[in-house]
Amino acid sequence: MQPSDTVQPIVLLVDKEDPAAHLDAVAAAAVASVSAYARRTEDTAWENWVFGRFTKSVRRAGPKVFEKMAASAPSGTVVVGRAKAVAFEPVTYEEMPGKLRGLQVSGTHLPDDAPVPGTPGAPVIVVNEDLEMSTGKAGAQAAHALLAWYLTLSGEERTAWYDGGHPASVRLAAGTEFTALAKDPGAGPLIVDAGMTEIAPNTATAFVAAAG
């Protein structure tokens, strides 16, 4: 199996009656993705994927379906403000369970309400504001960035972050600010998208900011 053959499904709660803030949902998707990897019990489903493009697919579900999905999600339920997300092991599209595959991918746009305050000292994922990505697309890119950052940590640092509640927040930056922050010493790997959906190929999308 080639690395690009598998995709990690991430599911966002989209409650039409009480929608979460866009940036909180993006953060929840990112943390859920890494949480599923951090909590893995074996590497078979992950070994090719994590060293490839670690493709992710962010899908949405209403409250009832989300709770059913959450019951079996290896990530556990990640909560950021009103946002909730879960993530699963990477699978091929053909092997993805039908209930997951049937969830809608595109068109998730949650409101631009103020996000909850981030935890001091926790990673901050910077997302390229110029791209005006949907919540689902931004969630996938933030998940790429947080995982790339997580993989740079030592075993002790990974454990400390996860056991400390695995917090993360998301902020937007545009233009020269985004470029400058990405070049700061200590910033996480810069994610450059393949351009399969929404944005042009080779577009810089997100990274974890250098610790302040």
Image: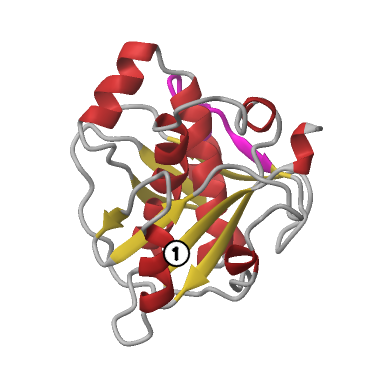
Q: In this view, does 15 lie above or below 193?
A: below
Q: Which one is in front, 29 or 114?
A: 29
Q: In this view, does 139 lie above or below 209?
A: below
Image spot of residue 193 (x, y percent): 70, 45
Image spot of residue 4 (x, y percent): 77, 39
Q: Is residue 10 magenta?
A: no
**Residue in the picture at 20% in, 31% down:** 164
Secondary structure predominantly adopted by residues drawn in magenta: loop
- Horizontal side of 29 relative to 18 (left or right) equals right
Identify the magenta region.
182-192
Secondary structure type for disc 1: strand
Image spot of residue 35 (x, y percent): 39, 39
Q: In which quarter of the image is the C terminus?
A: top left
- Horizontal side of 62 relative to 131 (left or right) equals left
**Residue in the picture at 20% in, 53% down:** 117
Residue beneath disc 1 = 12
- Horizontal side of 8 relative to 75 (left or right) equals right
Q: Can residue 212 be seen at all in this image of the molecule?
A: no
The image quadrant of residue 158 is top left
Dot 1 amino acid type: Leu
Image spot of residue 9 (x, y percent): 57, 53
Q: Can residue 56 be seen at all in this image of the molecule?
A: yes
Q: Residues within 10 Å of mark 1 (few under 14, many from 20)?
A: many
**Residue in the picture at 55% in, 65% down:** 59
**Residue in the picture at 27% in, 56% down:** 80
